[in-house]
Image (tube, rainbow, N blue to C red):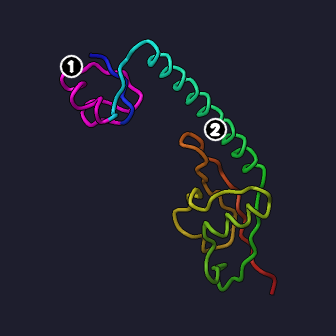
Amino acid sequence: MKLILREDVENLGKGGELVEVKPGYGRNFLLPRGLAVLANPKNVRELEHQKAIATAKAAKMKASAQAVAKRLAETPITLVRKVGEQDKLYGSVTAMDVAEALAARGLQIDRRSIDLAEPIKTTGDFEVPVKLHSEVVGKAKVKVEAEPA
């Protein structure tokens, strides 16, 4: 019996896949619980249509993430902080600070997507990775300067 899965089913497949199962399993378990639908020509066409829409949407999201990554590389930010001896900062520069500085420059980036391994605690130039998409990682140029005394 051929079925199209609506949801992920353990040990069988992921949602949207076309699977072959024994008739009893399909008729008594998958179909009554709404986990699958029969793989008739209409449902197969609808599945192909949904896959095409999902592929187009994913490509559009990736393209927009690449555009944001390009803008991110062209938009350096400078943060001015108080420093102590040996150019060590009082406090640190966190992902939240970087997100706020980018927002001030017109780039709305979620702070959770800024992949700062540990806070910046010294002055200098840094490249901070930003996860924009599962396949696209942008680099934000961050310059930390000392506040004039």
x, y percent for residue 18: 36, 21
- Residue of label 1: 23
Residue 80 figure quarter: bottom right
Q: Is residue 41 above or below residue 133?
A: above
x, y percent for residue 143: 73, 65
x, y percent for residue 130: 61, 53
Which segment is the magenta one? 8-33
Q: Is residue 31 magenta?
A: yes
Q: Is residue 53 magenta?
A: no
Residue count near mark 1 (Cα–Cα under 10 Å), binned few <14, some 14–19, many ≥20: few
Identify the element where label 1 is drawn.
helix
Total labels drawn: 2
Residue 85 figure quarter: bottom right
- The residue sitting at 74% across, 62% down in the picture is 103
Q: Outermost residue, front direction?
A: 32
Residue count near mark 2 (Cα–Cα under 10 Å), binned few <14, some 14–19, many ≥20: some
- Residue of label 2: 61
Counting residues from the N terminus, which is met first, the one under dot 2 or under dot 1?
1
Quadrant of the frame with the N terminus: top left
